[in-house]
Amino acid sequence: MILCIDVGNTHIYGGLFHNNELVLQFRKTSRQEFSSDEIGIFLKSVLKENNFNTENVNGISICSVVPDLNHSLRAGCVKYFNIEPFFLKPGVKTGLKIKYRNPVEVGTDRIANAIAAVHSFPDKNLIIIDFGTATTFCVVSKNKEYLGGIILPGIKISMEALDSKTAQLPAVEIKEMTEVIGRSTVESIQSGLFFGQIGIVKEIKSRIIEEVFKDEFPVVIATGGFSRLFENQKLFDIIIPTLVLNGLFLAYNINKEKEVV
């Protein structure tokens, strides 16, 4: 069994693969001061509570956008699983041609998404939209070229900015809206957050297609914690919430000679 862990700014999102299938998913709030013991105990506990034998874990694959946690992650995996974890990072095999001016700058979660998307849709141009702490766009050609992307504040960050930087605007529930005109302050904020993201996605998607894919339309994939919020808006061809975990599993396989189960 292979344990895959995506360490983000807001959550640690994990999954367990057995016989090439994702059999467990879990989340934990992320923070920068986790000790190796806290991480190791959490991972062991979540597996045991879901009736999985931790002794059967024979590989761990990690991507992290929180560098301060990487030492504790590695130490926790070594101490509690006796496994040296695989980190998706610059220099490892990905099957992609990274076209960033400085490839090191590309977030490893974005690379994991791209690996999984290319595997699921070979020989297709791709736009991958990840609705997480940030909303990110990744643009991948049918030739497996990672062309670049776009990063902007995510819907929750936008809400928190309004709450913290204004005197009278409150924090609100982030939800799908059916009417654009709000009839209260709360509804007005909710509408702005929801339809604002839709407008951003439509505009950026249109510009990407015009700039690089106008001759052959791409497959548009959504992922991330808030992707289901926009499920009814016809913005995407498919939503794959587990894309980053799938990519971590594939990256592990690409970089390990032994067969994994």
Image (spheres, grey):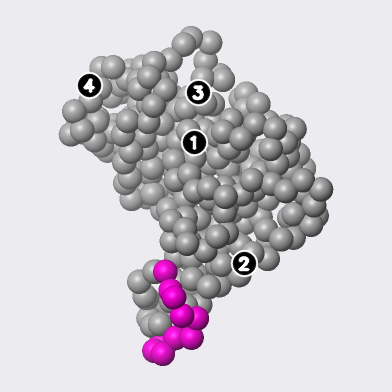
> Mark 2 Cα within 10 Å, few/some/many (few <14, many 20+)?
few
Q: Which numbered dot is residue 53? A: 4
The reply to whether dot 2 and dot 1 touch (C-beta < 8 Å) is no
Picture quarter containing residue 176?
Answer: bottom left
Q: How many discs mark residues in the rendered view?
A: 4
Which residue has dot 2 on it? 200
Which residue has dot 1 on it? 63
Residue 117 percent location from the top left of the image: 58, 37
The one nearer the camera, 98 or 188, is: 188
- Residue at 22% from the left image edge and 21% from the top image edge: 53
- Residue at 62% from the left image edge and 56% from the top image edge: 151
Q: Inspect the image, locate mark 2, and give the three-letter code of the amino acid beneath it.
A: Ile
Cα distance in 3D space between marks 1 and 3: 11 Å
Cα distance in 3D space between marks 4 and 2: 44 Å
Q: Inspect the image, locate mark 3, and give the three-letter code of the amino acid beneath it.
A: Tyr
Classified by dominant secondary structure, the portion drawn in magenta counts as loop
> Mark 1 Cα within 10 Å, few/some/many (few <14, many 20+)?
many
Cα distance in 3D space between marks 1 and 4: 23 Å
The answer to whether residue 64 is magenta is: no
Q: Earlier in the sequence, mark 4 or mark 2?
A: 4
Image depth: mark 1 or mark 3 in front = 3
Which residue has dot 3 on it? 252
- Residue at 46% from the left image edge and 80% from the top image edge: 179
Q: Earlier in the sequence, mark 2 or mark 1?
A: 1
Q: Earlier in the sequence, mark 3 or mark 2?
A: 2
